[in-house]
Image (cartoon, rainbow, N blue to C red):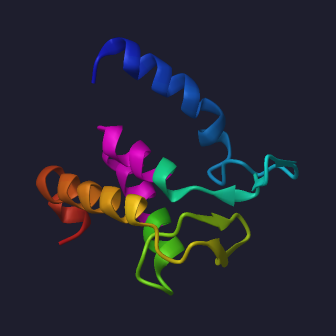
């Protein structure tokens, strides 16, 4: 990961890391309810991390959010993973496949 990208990414995630249920605010803007977590954000975080513990945390969050349906949702509510938008979101599911591939190559003990 290059230095500039790494610094921007670390800055972006400072607030996220303080509260893993990012977006826990009660306001609506342009029909987007910000009390919803976007799994694609978690997937990108895992894909770009080199920290095994952070990758495991991302994987655990994703598995927990989709365990009742077997798919990655577009978004889900911070307090209830069964309250979600789109039960199947191809973009997120495709990136989740890439994330699993990365894990299987770099940290196979996390999934096998």
Horizontal side of 2 relative to 78 (left or right) equals left
Q: Quadrant of the C terminus?
A: bottom left
Single out the residue that lies furthest toward the top. 4
Q: Position of residue 59 (x, y in %)?
A: 39, 61
- Residue 5 occupies quadrant: top left
Tell me, yes or no, if residue 44 can be seen here: yes
Residue 31 lies left or right of residue 82; in this view the side is right
Measured as percent of width and height from the top left, residue 94 is found at 31, 61
- Residue 98 appears in which quarter of the rendering? bottom left
Residue depicted at x 60% and y 30%: 14
Residue 59 counted in the magenta span: yes
Which is nearer the eye, 29 or 78? Answer: 29
Q: In which quarter of the view is residue 81 placed? A: bottom right
Residue at 57%, 72% in the rendered image: 86
Q: Look at 62% across and 40% down and name the residue there.
A: 16
Residue sticking out furthest to the left = 105
Residue found 87% across the figure and 52% down from its top: 26
Magenta stretch in the rendered image: 42-60
């Amino acid at each position: 990961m290059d230095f500039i990208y790494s610094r921007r990414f670390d800055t972006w995630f400072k607030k996220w890391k303080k509260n893993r249920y990012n977006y826990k605010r009660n306001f609506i803007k342009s029909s987007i309810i910000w009390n919803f977590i976007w799994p694609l954000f978690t997937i990108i975080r895992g894909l770009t991390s080199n920290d095994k513990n952070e990758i495991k945390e991302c994987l655990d969050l994703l598995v927990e959010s989709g365990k009742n349906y077997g798919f990655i949702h577009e978004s889900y509510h911070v307090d209830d993973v069964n309250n979600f938008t789109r039960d199947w979101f191809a973009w997120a599911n495709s990136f989740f496949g890439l994330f699993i591939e990365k894990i299987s190559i770099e940290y196979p003990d996390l999934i096998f």
